[in-house]
Amino acid sequence: MHPFAFSRASTITAALNAGARDGRYIAGGTTLIDLMRETVERPAHVVDINALPYKDITATRQGLHVGSLVRMSELAAHPEVRDTYPLLSQALELGASAQLRNMASIGGNIMQRPRCPYFRDIHSACNRRDPGSGCDARHGDNRMQAILGTSTHCVATHPSDLAVALVALDAVIHVRSLDGTRSIPVQDFFLRPGDTPQKEHSLRSGELITSLTIPAGAHTRRSGYLKVRDRQSYEFALASAAVALDIRGGVVRGARVAVGGVGTVPWRLPKVEQELVGKRPGRRTWTDAAAHAAEGAVPLSENAFKVRLVERTVRRQLMTIGGQ
């Protein structure tokens, strides 16, 4: 690991000042420390922000407010989250081992970087790590890579299960810098690689994630997360589906569906949602809607199976949440 300066910020102002000077924020450190050890990340200054006051979980009739320093395990176990936002709780519990969930913060989880082996191997070509160097994953071991939202510059899958749930639930991410505060719809937070794969999110230099909010709605209680993986123990998704449905009077009044394990960003499925609204719940409804889950997919040499897999994953989760 290369030499770096380390400090603890006891106030918000101190943290923001350090961030404005290219300091890297750290809470649980479950991603950043790994990348520093592998010399993929080489920050000159690491700032511990655990003393900051972003640790509250508040549920109101308007929605859920979560501080960025709340630990994954704490949010997953919160009674109101488990009861009213089961999709969120399930995504958190399926997203990491118990040890990692006890350490990792919500803000850190949102900011975690790709698990692509070529990104994490400094001897491989990777445009995210070294822009312009190429993408070895496109013609290499690409079974785990994305089929949606890819470009000729990058095919890395977004790793966060939590982020998939947040996209499905229309979360808003709140950030702060020395210039003030702003709120970013989660759908606009994560950036597809395009020609600039090194730009993974819409945070500006020096900005710190302080909290996120999830609006309340009839759909949040009837929701859940399904993760398909090679092994049942801690593993990243081959495909996953976050589904939230508002069913009243025997008709689907509203639907929110997003998938993970297949996109370069958490992938919302508006066509699937449109196919559901106004229909009566049932196997035919779920099957017809799920058939649109992989539209626009561009499979690679070893991951074409994900096209059918994501369709089946979405159908199965629609059946689970919506019933037969």
Image (cartoon, grey):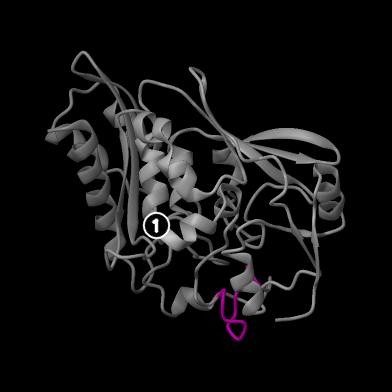
Residue 216, given in percent of the width and then of the height, sits at 46, 23
Q: Nearer the viewer, residue 34 or 12?
A: 12
**Number of numbered discs on residues:** 1
Residue 159, given in percent of the width and then of the height, sits at 47, 59
Q: Quadrant of residue 7?
A: bottom right
Does the magenta-highlighted stretch encompass residue 123?
yes
Residue displayed at 54% across by 56% down: 104
Does the magenta-highlighted stretch encompass residue 51?
no
Residue placed furthest toward the top: 249
Extent of the magenta region: 119-129
Residue 159, can we see it? no
Amino acid under label 1? Val
Question: Left of 3 or right of it: where is 210?
Answer: left
Q: If the image is split into quadrants, where does the N terminus sit?
A: bottom right
Question: Left of 120 or right of it: where is 174?
Answer: right
Residue 313, given in percent of the width and then of the height, sits at 25, 50
Q: Residues within 10 Å of mark 1 (few under 14, many from 20)?
A: many
Q: Quadrant of residue 11?
A: top right
Up-down relation of residue 261 to residue 121 (above or below):
above
Q: Nearer the viewer, residue 20 or 84?
A: 84
Residue displayed at 63% across by 70% down: 33
Residue at which label 1 appears = 262
Q: Check disc 1 and report its element: helix, strand or loop.
A: loop
Residue 114, given in percent of the width and then of the height, sits at 53, 64
Q: Nearer the viewer, residue 32 or 165?
A: 32
Q: Quadrant of residue 261?
A: bottom left
Q: If the image is split into quadrants, where does the C terminus sit?
A: top left
Q: Considering the whole magenta stretch, tell me its main secondary structure.
A: loop
